[in-house]
Image: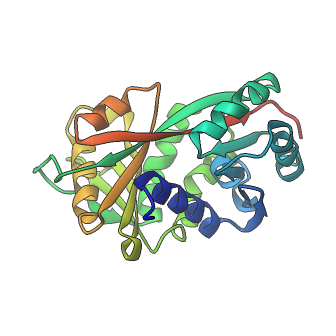
Amino acid sequence: MPATDLQRVTAFRLSFARRQAVVVTELPGGLAVLDPRYAASHEHNQLMIDRAPAPGELIALAEKFLGHLPYRRITVLDDASATACAPALTADGYLHDTELVMTHAGTAPYRGRSAEPVTVAELRPALIRQLCAWMPQASDAVIDQLAGRRTARLHAADRVTFLAVRDEDGAIAAWADLYLDPSQGIAQIEDVMTADERTRRGHGDAVLATALREAAGCGLVFLLADADDWPRTWYARRGFTPIGRSHVFTRTEAVA
């Protein structure tokens, strides 16, 4: 039986995590991925689980593989498994966030100017400015790691492109990541961002539309959106529809 779109997205996300990790450990129902270069990045140091084991076993696995870090992150890709595990994880101090898996149908909705490919080095100053605005208490070392982790993402898919649009003064105003696996006909658009001081000028539309045009050869184009935040409606107005949910459980108190 052919895989459903949601199953294909799940396989892509597991591959995405595996390909950019420095250390990968196969677990019951998923992976533990680690990257000591970016120890501050939850994305690069977490459990990625498709079908979760018993909640107590999942908590123990997080302690075993993430116990050296001041946080625990468990991403559960299967909605039913996450729902079953949620009570035990929240009782153990984990915060629970829900992600919508949204797919796009149709053509790019915007016909204005296009974004352009940029390097990690070109994008870095804009990332640092935005991270400092979001995380004013973070140390320089943490900001440096979070801006630099895109270097690891270069290995996450067969084709990786960082797209950006510049404002009138030449500064990068908005950006997004595009990850393509042409052989599997699947693409992910990730981290669509506009700098705080450059919003409401159409920059986000330009970046998103360019990413969609670049992904036009893939029959399945998806992104992730916080189920409780406003971007999900912005994406919906631009042709994205939810097809499923995944869940992120995070415990951030200092435990290391």
Q: Is residue 103 above or below residue 114?
A: above
Q: Position of residue 105 (x, y in %)?
A: 23, 50
Residue appearing at x 36%, y 32% in the figure: 231
Residue 20 appears in view? yes
Residue placed most toward the observer, 104 or 159: 104
Residue 173 appears in view? no
Residue placed most toward the observer, 81 or 139: 81
Position of 254 with respect to 209 (left or right) is right
Q: Position of residue 87 (x, y in %)?
A: 74, 24
Residue appearing at x 45%, y 61% in the figure: 3
Give the position of the N terminus as an image quadrant: bottom left
Within the image, what quadrant is residue 189 found in? bottom left
Give the position of the C terminus as an image quadrant: top right
Position of 147 with respect to 229 (left or right) is right
Q: Is residue 201 above or below residue 172?
A: above
Residue placed most toward the observer, 132 or 27: 27
Residue appearing at x 51%, y 69% in the figure: 154
